[in-house]
Amino acid sequence: MSDSKLAELEARVRELEDVREITDAARKFNWHCCGGYNGVQAGRMEALDSLADDATIEVKGLHEPGKGPKGREQVTEYWDYFYGDAGPLPYVFQAAVSEFVEVTGDVAESWCVMIGLFGFRGGKPAFNLATRRNYYKRTDKGWKITRTTIDGGLGFHVEELAPGQHALNELPPMDDRKPWTWEAQQAKDAAKAGS
């Protein structure tokens, strides 16, 4: 086998390994978001392990472009508001389908259709299909998501969640939580800079 053919095969194997690691990071993120049944809480903090320390979350309709939570501290504050049995979004099941990935050196981008069933407090559960885009970078801890977006989608409300043979978590009273907002973050940053 020629050196050029061997180099070509090595590059192809590396690309396949990268794509596998990237899709595994996305799958683990989605897996740790799921919960609200059999004692498993939705949105477990392990989901954040798939994110880079400087990652950004942008959800169309919640955040203007460039104004989502960024970095571990802001993302954790944003995350902590929504999830857990005492939060406003205690029931979540989500998965990505039709995913494809483009790798360019040490960065990558993936596109998928996300299927989700979300049970909010005080409202009807919703079944959603959304387009999601994740951006990645290679780190010393493997591929990590640097930015995750939900670009939009369609959905419908359902009357109630039917757990089947599984038990939905019994919910304690909702905590008095404050959501992360861009405006509040700007005020915090200004206060830090002024002190």
Image (tube, grey):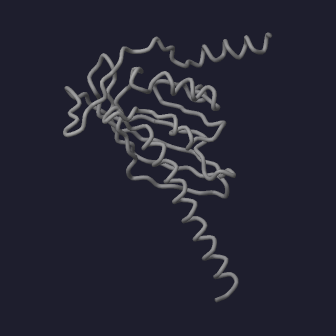
**Would you place residue 156 above or below residue 22 in this image?**
above
**The N terminus, quarter of image:** bottom right
Q: In screen coordinates, is 29 left or right of 171?
A: right
Residue at screen point 65% across, 38% down: 53
Residue at screen point 58% across, 41% down: 51
Q: In screen coordinates, is 72 left or right of 78?
A: right
Residue at screen point 40% across, 20% down: 86
**The C terminus, quarter of image:** top right
**Would you place residue 152 above or below residue 144 in this image?**
above
- Residue closest to the eye, 31 or 127: 31
Which percent across, then down, holds residue 130? 38, 38
Residue projecting furthest to the front: 39
Residue projecting furthest to the bottom: 1
User: Residue 14 appears in which quarter of the rendering?
Assistant: bottom right
- Residue closest to the eye, 48 or 189: 48
- Residue closest to the eye, 69 or 160: 160
Which percent across, then down, holds residue 175? 44, 14
Which percent across, then down, holds residue 75? 58, 29
Residue at screen point 37% across, 35% down: 40
Which percent across, then down, holds residue 45? 51, 34
